[in-house]
Image: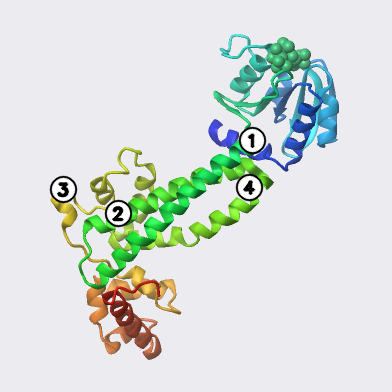
């Protein structure tokens, strides 16, 4: 079953600026009237409606405004965006608790708690749009306020991305010198997880911003391009058990905000066995999967095959062209490219130059 929070998120998306529903709500606000709108038409909703009249007309912003001029609620079938009822009295169970004041908002909250569908309430006096689903409640924010918070979050994402670039470059150089430590790996994973978190927050803003968030969406896309696959590569390089990457991903995602600052906790999610602070300075070897991903023209299957033959990047780097050729799917040409590219990466790293 879809959770109330997920339904609320969808509803926020449906009322985002630029959508027909938002246009209808803005028209109602401009005419200084209020509205009570149920987003969903089910037998349960039908049973809680009294009076008014039945309709089956396509939803338009102007129809919503006209129908909201009348007393009572409007019911919209969101499966085909048609208006099904207008001028109806909603009769949710009066024993359902509500902390709202004013009959419109109290009815909206009770109704939402009973049917677990979005119910919108527009106050005539305060120009506020509220959405209720189950016990969830959100005010629909003005685009300007949302946009300024989203911009702040994008600035943060930008700073986090720069910092990730730095720590990832350090890790790359240390990997080539066989000197990476648990701390370096955990620091990269920490930065990547922080980027994932702020990106998911921004995506929620973007959903609510609708067409007003288009430019910002492009900027975010630019900042996070390739970051999810890079994160998976680092995990595959260092997770104690390579088959465990899905668990690592899930645990990292749910790590509380107090624990995400703790490098030991992150290292332990990767299975790197940190029992005391000094363990963070233990050297670790990558499997070489990220380094192989930088070699041109290598398919994922070949990367997996090659990396499974040698247990560490340094062993892989010392493999000769002849040895590489013994791997299924690797011919003389590919073997040479792998060999030369890994050496090239190593030389660049030794010279302190990365980003090939
Ligand atoms: N149970 C209900 N079913 C349908 N419509 C209702 C219901 N309760 C209130 N309303 C609608 O809300 C309108 C305003 O009601 P009321 O003045 O009691 O609420 P309010 O919250 O004080 O108003 P506002 O939100 O505009 O400040 C009513 O005229 C009616 O159209």
Tell which circle, 3 or 2, labels the residue nearer the N-terminal end: 2
Q: Residues within 10 Å of mark 3 (few under 14, many from 20)?
A: few
Residue 302 location (% of width, % of height): 39, 76
Q: CA gap, disc 1 to disc 3?
A: 46 Å
Mark 1 or 4: in front is 4
Residue 274 location (% of width, % of height): 18, 50
**Label 1: which secondary element:** helix
Residue placed under numbered mark 1 in the picture: 11
* Residue in the foreground of this view, choosing between 141 and 99: 141
Residue placed under numbered mark 2 in the picture: 187
**Label 3: which secondary element:** helix
Tell which circle, 1 or 4, labels the residue nearer the N-terminal end: 1
Mark 1 or 2: in front is 2
Residue 143 location (% of width, % of height): 65, 38
State the image quarter where residue 82 is shown: top right
Give the residue drawn at x 72%, y 29%.
41
Residue placed under numbered mark 4 in the picture: 213
Tell which circle, 2 or 4, labels the residue nearer the N-terminal end: 2
**Label 2: which secondary element:** helix
Mark 1 or 3: in front is 3
Q: Residues within 10 Å of mark 4 (few under 14, many from 20)?
A: many
């Amino acid at each position: 079953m879809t959770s109330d929070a997920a339904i609320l998120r969808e509803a926020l998306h449906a009322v985002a600026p630029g959508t027909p529903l938002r246009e209808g709500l803005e028209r109602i606000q401009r005419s200084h009237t209020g509205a009570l709108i149920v987003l969903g038409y089910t037998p349960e909703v039908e049973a809680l409606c009294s009076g008014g009249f039945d309709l089956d007309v396509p939803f338009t912003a102007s129809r919503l405004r006209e129908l909201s001029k009348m007393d009572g609620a409007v019911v919209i079938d969101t499966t085909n965006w048609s208006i099904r009822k207008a001028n109806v009295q909603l009769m949710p169970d009066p024993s359902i608790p509500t902390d709202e004041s004013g009959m419109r908002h109290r009815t909206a909250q009770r109704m939402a708690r009973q049917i677990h569908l979005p119910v919108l309430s527009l106050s005539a006096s305060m120009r506020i749009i509220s959405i209720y689903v189950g016990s969830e409640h959100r005010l629909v924010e003005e685009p300007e306020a949302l946009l300024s918070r989203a911009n702040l979050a994008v600035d943060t994402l930008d700073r986090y991305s720069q910092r990730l670039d730095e720590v990832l470059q350090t890790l790359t150089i240390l990997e080539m010198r066989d000197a990476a430590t648990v701390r370096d790996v955990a620091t990269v994973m920490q930065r990547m997880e922080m980027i994932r978190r702020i990106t998911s927050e921004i995506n929620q803003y973007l959903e609510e911003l609708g067409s007003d968030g288009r430019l910002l969406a492009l900027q975010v896309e630019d900042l996070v391009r390739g970051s999810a696959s890079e994160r998976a590569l680092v995990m595959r390089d260092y997770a104690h058990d390579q088959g465990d990457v899905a668990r690592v991903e899930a645990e990292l995602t749910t790590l509380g905000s107090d624990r995400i600052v703790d490098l030991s906790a992150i290292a332990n999610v990767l299975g790197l066995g940190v029992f005391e602070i000094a363990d963070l300075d233990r050297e670790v070897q990558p499997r070489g999967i990220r380094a192989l991903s930088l070699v041109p023209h290598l398919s994922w299957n070949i990367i997996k095959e090659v990396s499974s033959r040698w247990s560490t990047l340094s062993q892989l780097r010392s493999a000769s062209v002849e040895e590489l050729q013994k791997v299924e799917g690797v011919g003389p040409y590919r073997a040479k490219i792998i060999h030369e590219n890994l050496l090239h990466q190593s030389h660049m790293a030794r010279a302190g130059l990365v980003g090939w």
